[in-house]
Amino acid sequence: MATSPGAYAVPTRLSPSRISDWRSCPLAYRLKHLDGLGKHEPPKAHLVKGNFVHSVLEALLAHPRDERTTQRAQEAFDETQRHYETSPRFRALGLDEVATADFWRHSRELINGYYRIENPRVPEVLGLELSLETSLGPFVLHGIIDRLERAPDGALVVSDYKTGKTPSPGYGAARMGNMHLYASLCHRERGELPARLRLYYLESSEIIEAQVTPETNARTEADALAVHAGIAAACASGEFPATTSGLCSVCFFKPWCPAFGGSPEAALTEIPLQYPVVPRD
């Protein structure tokens, strides 16, 4: 369903996740970001767990190399757990006693999965949760890099942790698409193009790597500019088509999607009434 032409201002800032949202489904992008309904989506246990595990590893790797001991890891886990137990988003999950115990048990398993991949004393960490932004002309690209490091061979490496299952090749390529955007941010803001991108899949203790070259970086930036042009055209026309895929089964906006008999315009009033905003931690 179309909105009235020119109903939306063209965004002047995009992040890798927002670019990914547009590629997945323009209608969901519109509802989530342009209509501002994303803030109403209830927290999901797997996402809260992912944030928790990221926070634990960030706290551990923030220490100097020789202090990244198992005791420090335990302290990081316990301190982060105490914070999360009282956080609005964790409490909004409404987990019972059994589910809560399983949440923490699985979180520990994921941390153990990291230890099966590498010794935390090895990485030469240059930055954690590193916020960067750069102008790509018609918009500002911004994002937060989970981990930037200097590899033993001198290469710059951008890394991220994933707490879900290792994806199929198609979905893995999409994840790396976001990572290439982080490489572009590094190149423009730090003056050095990372040589490699690395995804740590903690569930399976696997690493997926991709190489970065000037050619891949040029394609990445060209693709980002094309996405922004597509968004700009949709903002002008009011046309934000729904794209159906396997992701529809977990999409918050599915009940209001015309592909499933819903009304996007009804979402504008129904979602705020049905789903109060949960404060961020």
Image (cartoon, rainbow, N blue to C red):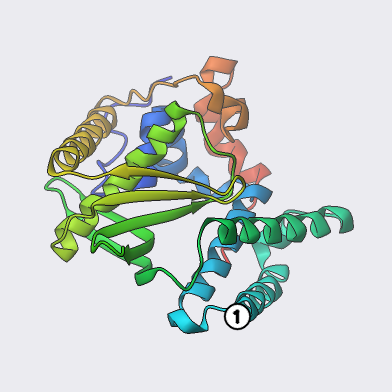
Between residue 171 and residue 92, name the one nearer to us: 171
Image x and y of residue 256, in percent:
57, 27
Q: Nearer the viewer, residue 232 or 155?
A: 155
Q: Quadrant of residue 73?
A: bottom right
Q: Position of residue 209 (x, y in %)?
A: 37, 44
Between 29 and 224, the residue placed more toward the observer is 224
User: Which quadrant of the structure image shows residue 232?
Assistant: top left
Relative to 203, is 237 above or below? above
Q: Residue 25, image x and y in percent?
A: 42, 28
Q: Is residue 76 visible?
A: yes
Q: Residue at x 34, y 47 (%)?
A: 179
Q: Which residue is mark 1?
A: 72
Q: Residue at x 53, y 56 (%)?
A: 117
User: Measured from the top left, where is residue 137 in percent x and y?
Assistant: 11, 47
Question: Does residue 188 sit above or below 138 in this rendering?
Answer: below
Residue that sits furthest to the right in the current view: 97
Q: What residue lies at 60% left-to-right and 45% top-to-bottom?
A: 204
What element does badge 1 sit on? Answer: helix
- Which amino acid is tagged 1? Arg
Q: Where's the C terminus, which quadrant?
A: bottom right
